[in-house]
Image (tube, rainbow, N blue to C red):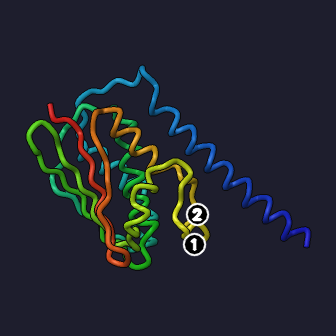
């Protein structure tokens, strides 16, 4: 009984630690002293995939990418953006994840897409997923802080872009966002 209680406390501490880290990440997005310089997003994505190496092997994920541009964004925030979006694509997938990242220039901005074959998002929940602490009813099956996509939105909006999702439950999602071209 004591061991069960201790395990419960340890799990609670781990969840709280993850929550605090997510809140700290969210709070750094608003710092005015974060410089935006041209960043090679191919390099950023490669580093994120290296960080996810063991998770990719564990989930037998296949992650592909078209050539990605350089954009004016803080490298740390770009990394956080792709960590959240790629991490969610793997997390919310009940089969071997298939994720594809692409970017297309449209006038004065780049349109990015991160396509997955995950569980998808019901239409009535698509706006809520970008609200801090909002999670879909899958909270028990897919634990998390409910801060990741709110952080992504804050990063994108900081640079004058927008983010949205297109999805079919059971078929996957496509997260799209824009960033200014230079």
| Image quarter of residue 79 | top left
Report the residue at 31% width, 53% height from top: 164
Q: Which mark is residue 149?
A: none
Residue farthest to the front?
124
Name the side, left or right, on which 34 lies relative to 174: right
Q: Residue under label 1, please give it.
A: 141
The quarter of the picture where residue 162 lies is top left
Question: Which quarter of the figure is the C terminus placed in?
Answer: top left
Residue 12 rendering spot, x and y as whole percentages: 74, 57
Query: Percent from the top left, x then y, of residue 78?
Result: 34, 40
As drawn, 170 above or below 31 = below
Foreground: 150 or 3? Answer: 150
Residue at left 12%, top 36%?
Answer: 108
**Residue occupying the far left of the picture:** 107
The reply, left or right, for residue 137 in relation to residue 57 is right
In the rendered structure, find residue 143 and report the number of the disc placed on it.
2
x and y percent of residue 163 in the render?
31, 48
């Amino acid at each position: 009984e004591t061991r069960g209680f201790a395990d419960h406390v340890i799990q609670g501490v781990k969840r709280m630690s993850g929550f605090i880290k997510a809140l700290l990440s969210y709070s750094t997005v608003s710092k005015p002293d974060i410089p935006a310089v041209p960043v090679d997003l191919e390099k950023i994505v490669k580093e994120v995939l290296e960080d996810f190496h063991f998770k990719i092997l564990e989930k037998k994920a296949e992650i592909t990418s078209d050539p990605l541009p350089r954009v004016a964004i803080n490298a740390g925030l770009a990394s956080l953006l792709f960590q959240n979006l790629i991490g969610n694509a793997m997390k919310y997938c009940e089969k071997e994840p298939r994720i594809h990242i692409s970017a297309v220039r449209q006038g004065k901005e780049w349109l990015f897409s991160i396509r997955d074959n995950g569980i998808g998002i019901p239409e009535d929940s698509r706006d809520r997923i970008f609200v801090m602490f909002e999670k879909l009813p899958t909270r028990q099956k897919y634990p998390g802080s409910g801060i990741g996509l709110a952080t992504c939105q804050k990063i994108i909006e900081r640079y004058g872009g927008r983010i949205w999702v297109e999805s079919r439950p059971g078929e996957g999602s496509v997260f799209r966002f824009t960033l200014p071209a230079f």
